[in-house]
Amino acid sequence: MTEPAVPDRDLTPVAALIGDPTRIAMLAALAEGRALPAGDLARRAGVRPATATAHLRRLIDGGLVAVRAQGRHRYHELASPSVAAAVEALAQLAPPAPVRSLRSDRAARALAEARTCYDHLAGRRGVQLRDRLLAAGALHQENERDHRLTPAGRSLLTGLDIDPERLARTRRMFARGCVDWTQRRPHLAGALPAALTARFLELGWLSRATGRALRAAPDYDQRLDAWLVGQEQRTDHRDADEQQHGEHGDQPHRGGGARVQRRIPGGSPHEDR
């Protein structure tokens, strides 16, 4: 008789923690990327404060939730982005929640359009962002999951006042494909999409709605186009210059020391030399 395969990880304790309706409701609330007090989590899970405290203790002891003290207050957050990724992965397997009202239908549509997956953009807008970055040559897909930043991508980040070197120094994964449970196509997870999402919120391209939902500005697509197409045009001009120099030899570049001012779409002017 063949012995059953033994997994190299003991999944039972984690599965037991996540499998409880109250605890998964708390984890889903924390997957919004915000640290919440126990009282808020009790309301989100629909339980009494004492019951919420007992469930939170189990999540903390199980390594899924961390506590951050701020003065006399205690805030709870997911222990790591991998916990949010696990919740998102479970959502791919779970059946859709029943729609019982117009309000719940609108909430579901809003989540499918744009939401946070822990701290990065997900939903249709998240999938769109990955597609656009790849199409603009800002990212290169190294394998089925991971992406690396190209020189064009570094220029794009600099144009939004995001330091690509600082992102590269983080211990967190940089840009990994994460299958979106509403779109069934990958959006990006990791340090890069987290930084872009935070910057989009700062610039007003995105704003927070209810829960995990995000709201795109009316001119979001125009701002995204201006940012990405501007980079494409600069890349095309640079390639043309390099080709011309290759044909005619090195020639002095007119106005080589002049400043060129460009404006971050929806943001402040940015100067290049």
Image: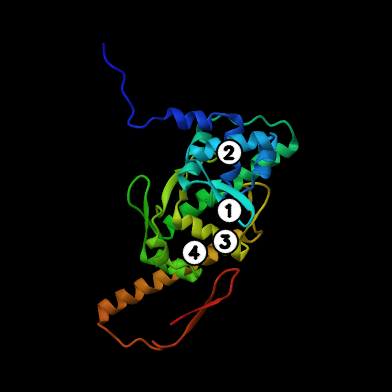
Q: Earlier in the sequence, mark 3 or mark 2?
A: 2
Marks counted in the figure total 4
Look at the numbered discs 4 and 2 and tell me whether their residues touch, using CB distance below 8 Å.
no
Q: Which residue is mark 1?
A: 69
Q: Which of pointers 4 and 2 indicates the residue nearer the eye?
A: 2
The amino acid marked with disc number 4 is Leu
Say which of 80 and 151 sits in front: 80
Q: Earlier in the sequence, mark 3 or mark 4?
A: 3
Q: Earlier in the sequence, mark 1 or mark 2?
A: 2
Q: Which residue is mark 3?
A: 200
The amino acid marked with disc number 1 is Ala
Q: Which residue is mark 2?
A: 56
Give the spatial CA distance, label 1 vs label 3.
28 Å
Say which of 156 and 73 sits in front: 73
Q: Residue at x 59, y 34 (%)?
A: 55
Residue 18 makes an appearance in the image: yes
Q: Earlier in the sequence, mark 4 or mark 2?
A: 2
Say which of 122 and 174 sits in front: 174
Give the spatial CA distance, label 1 vs label 2.
15 Å
Q: Position of residue 226 (x, y in %)?
A: 54, 66
Name the quadrant of the C terminus.
bottom left
Say which mark, if any, is on residue 228: 4
Q: Position of residue 264 (x, y in %)?
A: 55, 71
Give the spatial CA distance, label 3 vs label 4.
14 Å
Q: Is residue 255 above or below residue 197?
A: below
Name the secondary structure under disc 4. Answer: helix
Q: Which of pointers 3 and 4 indicates the residue nearer the eye?
A: 3
Q: Residue at x 65, y 39 (%)?
A: 108
Specify few, some or many for label 2: CA neighbours under 10 Å numbering under 14, 14-19, or 20 or more: many
